[in-house]
Amino acid sequence: MEETWKVVNSLAERLDSHYDRNDEQRWTVQALKLQEEAGEVAEAVIGALGANPRKGHSHDWDDVRKETCDVAVSALVMLVRMGGDPRRFFDEHLRAVASRDTENGTRT
């Protein structure tokens, strides 16, 4: 996991070095990027199912997995770009989600 955060921090630093805007504008653009990546997951699912008659089976489930990874990376980069202690924030949030799911008797 240490390597994951190292890569995510590096990506965030590189993006911030190329975007000379205030914090809220950088965060907004990153949120839009996150939404774009989520749309690519949807496109890949539609392609894996062959649900678009014009395109047919344009993707497979590995494509869906790759696009899902892009969503996860974009979300972690956004968290880093927002400052503070993103790793601590993420870990605390993950524990809260796990605790909530355990209390409800469900697993995600």
Image: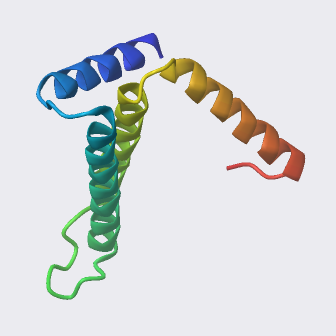
Position above or below: 8 against 45: above
Residue at the (31%, 63%) spot, across then down: 39
At which x and y percent is residue 30? 29, 43
Specify whether 30 is left or right of 108. left
Q: Quadrant of residue 42?
A: bottom left
Residue at the extreme front: 22
Specify whether 54 is left or right of 104. left
Q: Quadrant of residue 94?
A: top right
Residue at the extreme left: 18
Residue at the (40%, 18%) spot, across then down: 5
Position above or below: 90 against 31: above
Q: Quadrant of residue 40?
A: bottom left
Residue at the (14%, 30%) spot, across then down: 20
At which x and y percent is residue 92? 67, 26
In front of the other: 36 or 84: 84
At which x and y percent is residue 32? 29, 53
Looking at the picture, the colour scheme in use is rainbow
Residue at the (88%, 45%) spot, across then down: 103
In front of the other: 59 or 22: 22
Position above or below: 70 against 60: above
Residue at the extreme bottom: 53
Label count reads 0
